[in-house]
Image (cartoon, grey):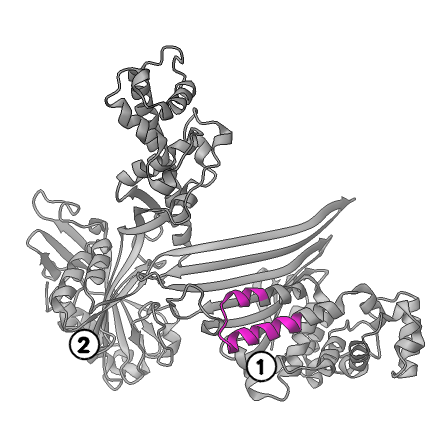
Amino acid sequence: MPKQLNAEQLLEDIKELAVFNKSIADYPHTSPMSLDLGDDDNNLWEYEDKASFNLTGLLSFHVLNSVDDLKNDPIVQQHNSTPSDGVLSKPITFDANQPHCLYKFIAEGQAKGSSTYDKLGFNFDIAAGFSLGAYRSHPNDFTLLDAVKNDLGSFPVIFSFDDIKELTTGSALDLDVSGEFEVGAEFSWSDLLKDSLRVLSDIVDDDALNITVKAAASVGLSLKVAGGFKVVFAKPTEDNFYIGLKKGSAYTFGADVGLSVGAEFTDPSKVEQFLGEHLDQLFKLPSDAIATGDSVISQIEEELQTAVSYDQLPTRLQPSVDKLFDKLGLDTAEKELAELKERLAEVKSDLQKSIKEVATTKATAAFAYQYKRVKQHDALLEGKIPVASVNVLKQMHASAIKGKFKEVVELFVSNNDCELTAFFNQKVDTTNTSFGFTFTIGDITAFGKDFEEVEKKTTFNVNNHKMIAFDAKRGYKKLYGSRHSTYYFDFDADMTEFSPEHSPTADLFNIGFSTRLETSGDDFSPNKAIDLAHTWGIIDADKLPSALASLENAIAGAEDISCVSTCNVSHDYFEHVLSLLCDIDNEDLGYALGRALSYVDKPYRDNADLREEVFGGMFEHLLNKKKDYPWKISWEEAIEDLDKKLAKFEYHKHANRKQGTFLYTVYKHPKWRLRTKQFTDGLASLYNAITHKKGYEEIQKAYKGMKHLGGNLFYLRFVGALLAITKRSDRMAAQGITGSITISFKKDGVKMKHLIG
């Protein structure tokens, strides 16, 4: 490879540009620049005397001198972020005193003589083109011209092991390419054949398909994935090298080609073994194969090797042989053993073929589905190699640059000094439930759907340690003519490290939840949007008039207006906020319920602070007295301690069924007290699970109590109102509880947004 690139003309050209005569720290651009190195055969280098690679003149250049540059970068992370065990997805740490220059060369390859790249052992399609990248850091007072001159004068490439070995701390090399990589995985037989046995053979009756498969029974398959990939070598610390395989970005060569996955058994004899253990069940024979590994059919096959006539078979096997003659369509009178032996072999061969086909198809589909869920740049494989393990690093390098990552995994497993921190192996359990209605009245279509979406994703590393992510939504969608809205309660709990425990404890999870309301068409109202922002503590009461005026001015003459309102408890502050929520009493709950009421009626409903003050005590009264609902008993008994003037006003409104009044609300939501208790009990259960380090299943149980609030907009308003009250007197809670109202619209065909909060 060339240590000296022919970049003289490029350097002459760029030194005239003012930006290249400033320091690296002052580089202003937020996106890469395109430079032209020029075509030159001297930028060509050899690989093992069997192939050559050439850097074309196309060069992308960027400087990472701000944390704003790191959002979409797959290699460099923010200085204050801590890589979690098993997810070291960005190996290099940003240092403002040592900014990185990032280079990307487009390259081409050509095999020599009659060789081809696949004969050289490459799983990557090198001949189709690829890109080579280098991250090189410099002191921030370096001029950009000096940095570029230094870097292009001795440009390293990932194909050279010498360049890998000589990486300085904080530097990295990468390769973007399309191709194929291979991994091994264990699959459960019960998962692979679930609901699929009826396609195995026409001779097996449907009622015989309910066979018992041991839950622990598994089989190894080799999976090959073709697509776009990024290979990375880096030196994050003085003590370790880093190797990573990542799913390709949108800019990766071949990332837009169709993903393909293939599977094959690592040990084909496992299929025969499985069939031997379960064939008795398929034919409804008395089977003890699972317990003893010695099936009736295997005993019959052994006897058929020597027996010439039916009479020579052991008496205990003859009833089963009779059944086989019948099931296989053979002459039950003649009972020719040679025919039975031949036909049984044919059936077993057909069944083995079908099992292989069903199993590999299911494994392929499952792996492809999970693979597509991996985000761009998320690690498929990552590990750390001590600097002292140079020979191992060299072996891994030789395999990795050819796309042979199965060999890389094997090297990690066989070398105790090396640590395989991440390896793609995920299981996702998803449950989606919904019920609702749809009907049409004239030109108006009405639609309503109560829904819940629950996903539990378990990722395993090479040591079979697990990392769990739990995400759940419970909400409601409705459409009536031009009125459209969706609202839901969103709860998530994610582990940040792998755990060896079968049931990881709740304290290992980052937890958060949020409320969300989406409105469009006639369901959107500027007054409602501003009121909700006040209810959820996004804006203060004194800002209401100006916020409303600003919104109305922004959307004047606009079309396609939609609004998204959110209130969140962030992961970083969740435990602190949770402890505060667990200390709430009926007074706080009453205030939150009052604050959550509709703003419809004046003078009592025109701002959330007033609603809280006026109606909070009424809700608290009902919570404390634990009496029946006011419309079922005498009014005087229900409000004996309340303001009589307000009580008469409310009673009058209720008598006339006016929407939005206090009594109308509790009448419309008869389970409000139960839902409030379920929410607070869920919070207490969650706090108890975290504090006492109980199993993560307690998190799911807590969600089941809290989720009911997502099915009704009043309850969602209540959650946001309770959070608004909680953060008033606690600075840390105010940092952890956030919210925003985003209104999207079009003016003159241009998409625009207006943000509140």
Q: Please tell me which residue lies in front, 216 or 570.
A: 216
SS at mark 1 in the image: helix
In this view, 335 is above or below 321: above
Quarter of the rendering containing residue 27: bottom left
Which numbered disc covers residue 579? Answer: 1
User: What is the C-alpha distance between the residues marked 2 and 1?
Assistant: 46 Å
Instruction: Write the start and end of the magenta stretch as one range.
Output: 679-701
In this view, 212 is above or below 386: above
Question: Is 700 one of the magenta-colored residues?
Answer: yes
Quarter of the rendering containing residue 292: top left
Amino acid type of the residue that numbered disc 2 sits on in the rendered structure: Thr
Amino acid type of the residue that numbered disc 1 sits on in the rendered structure: Ser
Question: Is 104 one of the magenta-colored residues?
Answer: no
Which residue is pictured at 84% across the width and 73% down the height?
627
> Which badge, 2 or 1, comes first in the chain's sequence?
2
Which residue is pictured at 78% across the width and 65% down the height?
669
Residue sitting farthest toward the top? 334
Q: Position of residue 234 (x, y in %)?
A: 23, 70
- Which residue is under mark 2? 168
**Does residue 490 appear left or right of residue 294 in this picture?**
right
Between label 2 and label 1, give the one nearer the viewer. 1
SS at mark 2 in the image: loop
Q: Please tell me which residue lies in front, 746 or 229.
A: 229
Which residue is pictured at 89% across the width and 67% down the height?
632
**Does residue 308 appear left or right of residue 736 in this picture?**
left
Assign the N terminus to one quadrant of the image. Answer: bottom left
